[in-house]
Image (cartoon, grey):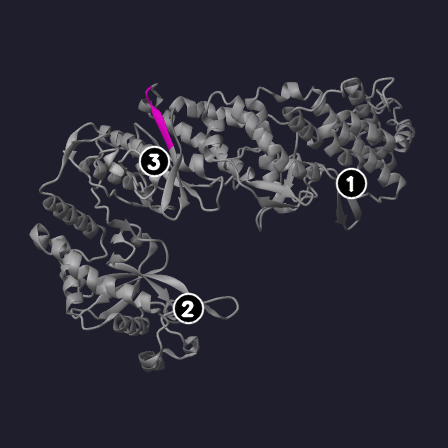
Amino acid sequence: MCCALLNELADLRRSLAEQGIQTAPWHPSLQPLRKGIAVIIELDVEGSPAHVSSLLPVQALDLRNIQPDNQKRFPAFNLDCPLFQDASLAVTELDILEPLLATATLACKKKDIVRIGRSLYEFPARELVPVLMSGSAATNPVLGSTHALLQALAKSTLDAEGFLRAFALAALHSVLGGTLGKDLLLQILFGKLNKNGERDPWQLLIFLDIADAAGFSHRVADPAVAVAWSHAMLTAADSESTAATILRCSLSGEEGESAGNKMPSPNLPLLGGTYLMAMNADIPAQTRYGRSSTDIFPLAKQTVQELNDSLLHITAPERRGKTWGPVASGTQDKPDLLIVYLEKDTEGELRLASALGDDDDWEEDGESSDAPNQQVSEARFANGPSSFESRTKRLIEAIQLKPDLMQDDAFLRVFVISTIDKGRKQVLFDQRYGVGALFRARERWIAGSRNVPPITIFLPQSKGRKARLYSEHVPTPVAVLKSLRQQWIRDGTMNQTVPGVDLRRVYSLLLEESVEREAMWMLERLLPLSQVLLIRAGRSYTDQKKTGEVHTLQAGAGLPVEARRPLLTVIALYGILLHRLGRYKENYMEGRDYLLGQFLQCADELHLLYCEHVRGGSVPPQLIGNAAMPMALENPKKAVEVLGARVPVYFAWLTQKASTKIRPADDGVTQRKFSEMNDAEKSTLRAKSISRRLGELSAELKGKLDAPVSLTGRAELLLGYLAREPKTYDSPEDQSAFTSLPIAPGENA
């Protein structure tokens, strides 16, 4: 973590400096406010709560808190709600609630009351007053409200418990005065109401301010005040280091005052407190040479400050989606932090983090079909751009408008920080790419996603939107990462989370030029995770219509809806991996393994047609081709032998059915349209098509079943089994009648 993060931050600092960007110098103790419900408590001159109002999230984004550690916070601190134990008081009318609160028992634990007292009185008086009310800070008009707040707290005669009771009464009066919502008041006093009618505990953020804010140029809850705090605290720290050690900084190479042993711990989005460098001297391995931490890697104080400022700048709330964002972890449920920027354009509006980090694959596009019927779906077939494809297209178009970014010396920096445990963070991935590599990566990724045969998945949409058929879907890298954490079980109807791959491998698959070894490793991992899902997706599905049962071999139709989107991602990932391994669909679709998958799918069509016409529509849960799939993946020859023992009766019926003549048009020569035929003629035409296709596949596979199936062959076999060749029904005659299974003469049939 230490070296990788420090090196990345040094590069970031250099990029900002080259662009002339001055980052705000933040003292390490200044931290952004945590997200969540928050209120502002305005104190009178005696330090007693006078008014309470909601702190809007958009306002809280720009505010900071002085927080050197978890025990010292000012002017914001957390309050565990409810305040009072007796939740039955929540039904009391507000105008008679005040006297009841005066004697009601507080729900706060003793340790929490001690913590709140420390934040209210002890910490400000001992550590902040000497810094913020002396020297140049004492005459800074921006800090006028802060001085008034510190003085009010110093005058207060309330202890922590008394302060909380006064807060409850002030909140009640604020509701009656119309500055605070009644529901929020009841949540603070008695807990959040759940769906069972009970009240649950929760945590509120309290921000202290002064009631007489109009008498000052800035109220405490003003972003400019936090900047003034930081300046005063940094100035005080400089004045204290009169006899500091001078050294040559390991990162900058410049001489400067030593940063000391303790490094900043900026509060990063998603991760919380993150030490720029931390080594535990109690661990023998970290002191084996007699030194630890900054004794090994000496750093100048000014350099460390600039690194800290650069990191806070690039992860500022307003830059979410541009230079930072959440990205799924390969090993845990909590997301990691992705930081990405262009070295020549760190301040641009390009949404780099969204393009590389978001896992939303689905565009909010227009019309689509209600049902997978051939007549409607062809006109509304959904093979348009996915959100990944459209997002990266917009990104690249924006880059192309900036000539400086199209030069050979324009580079993209990408690094990911993950939480190992509560106290440790780690850089999982850090790399530098030319901007041209991003362009090539996009084209490669899209080409790989489309390196699959015709496979369509029927996918219901959100409420109020029509369902659609999806094909050639382009997943995000994060969706790929998630698919590698899902082990499909119970016949493809459920999945369980397993340890996945780290994001480094997925980004390498996307961005690196040559990744054959990585792609083969990933394919070997993907096959056992997803094989069950793909085999289940090929099963027949029986739909209950008003006109009766309708049987279909539409890929994925029998899967639960929540399994179909992962199925689309997995199919695309097979295409991407095969593409990176030099296995292109123009070639592998003519190979043995793909054709074997097609043969087994064709056997399913035969079995289904037989069941519809001979067994009165009674279709078994698993057709013969689907049943043979697991064996075919291991031993193609054995699978076909077992299949051959089951199907003679089906083939005999097919031969008879396919030999039936179909009446031509009235002129006695022209073939009638499929829509003009009756049901018997349509089934005959289907039989002819199946017979012809089985004959073609048998000829192609004959004598080729002895060789084992490779890893790439397994993927191709699965794709071949799910692929549905378009049915043209353009010939009424059986041009290539099926004769035998694809086993050479002399072999065990």
Q: Is residue 411 magenta?
A: yes
Amino acid type of disc 1?
A: Gln
**Mark in front: 3 vs 1:** 1
Residue hosting label 2: 191
Q: What element carries label 2?
A: loop
On the image, the x and y values in percent for residue 221 come to 23, 56
**Residue 150 left/right relative to 369:** left
Q: Quadrant of the N terminus?
A: top left
Q: Position of residue 187 (x, y in %)?
A: 40, 68
Q: Is residue 542 above or below residue 297?
A: below
Under circle 3, the secondary element is: loop
- Look at the image and tell me in which quarter the C terminus lies: top right
SS for callout 1: loop
In this view, the residue in front, 117 or 228, is: 117
Which residue is label 1 attached to? 622
Residue 437: quarter of image: top left
Q: Which secondary structure dominates the residues rendered in magenta?
A: strand
Residue 542 is left or right of residue 234, and the answer is: right
> Based on the displayed image, in which of its 4 quarters is residue 121 positioned?
bottom left
Tell me whether the residue at label 2 lies in contact with that at label 1, contact meaning CB atoms closer than 8 angstroms. no
Query: Disc 3 and disc 1: Cα gap in Å?
Result: 53 Å
Q: Distance between the residues labelled 2 and 3?
A: 42 Å
Q: Name the residue under label 3.
A: 349
Q: Is residue 366 left or right of residue 82?
A: right
The three-letter code of the residue at mark 3 reads: Glu
Q: Is residue 319 magenta?
A: no
Amino acid type shown at disc 2: Gly
Q: In this view, does 547 lie above or below 600?
A: below
- Residue 300 visible in this rendered orientation of the protein: yes
Labels in figure, total: 3
The magenta segment is 409-414
